[in-house]
Image (cartoon, rainbow, N blue to C red):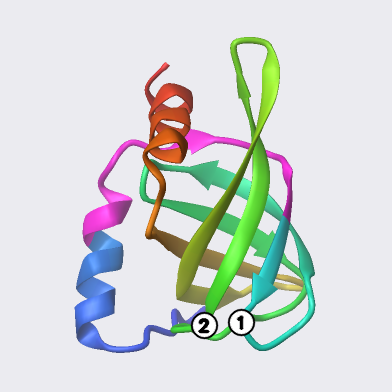
Amino acid sequence: MSIDFVDPALRIAANDLRSEPRKPLCAAAAVVPASGAAIQATTANVSVHGVDLISEIELRPATRCEVAFSLPIAGQMRPVQLQACVVRSTPGVDNFSLGLVFFGMPPRTQELLESFVYN
């Protein structure tokens, strides 16, 4: 399997982010690339700064998108909607493993992610 990165700077950033705490999460996600229709995916794990997704559709690194999913916090499903950029796309047998980094996050969304990941 090969991992496709946009450039060395993003590869370094993605590796640095992988070292932060991640929490498993299997939830339906909708990914809307800036230049296309919504793609259905499933979250694999979440950190405060990114998410790993499993998708039947490939998104190339450097693709900007909006990603939406829900976090189970204190017995309630809390929807989050974030701007993100694909930093990793790894082909599997019949799907793709995608790594997305969040950007431009509102403070309330940051709080929800921290609550989910650290509790």
The residue lying at 37 percent from left, 59 percent from top is 104
Q: Nearer the viewer, residue 73 or 17?
A: 73
Which quadrant holds residue 56?
bottom right
Q: Which residues are magenta?
A: 16-29
Between tags 2 and 1, which lies in front? 1
The residue lying at 25 percent from left, 47 percent from top is 19
The residue lying at 67 percent from left, 45 percent from top is 69
Q: Amino acid at mark 1?
A: Ala
Distance in Å between CA atoms under marks 2 and 1: 8 Å
Q: Amino acid at mark 2?
A: Thr
Residue 12 location, x and y as percent?
A: 20, 71
Contact between labelled residues 1 and 2, with CB atoms less than 8 Å apart: yes
Which residue matches tag 2? 63
Instruction: Tell which circle, 2 or 1, labels the residue nearer the N-terminal end.
Output: 1
Residue density around tag 2, few if under 14, some if 14–19, many if 20 or more, within 10 Å: some
The residue lying at 50 percent from left, 52 percent from top is 51
Task: Determine whether the residue tagged by mark 1 lies in a helix, strand or loop.
Answer: loop
> Is 100 colored magenta in this rendering?
no
Which residue matches tag 1? 34
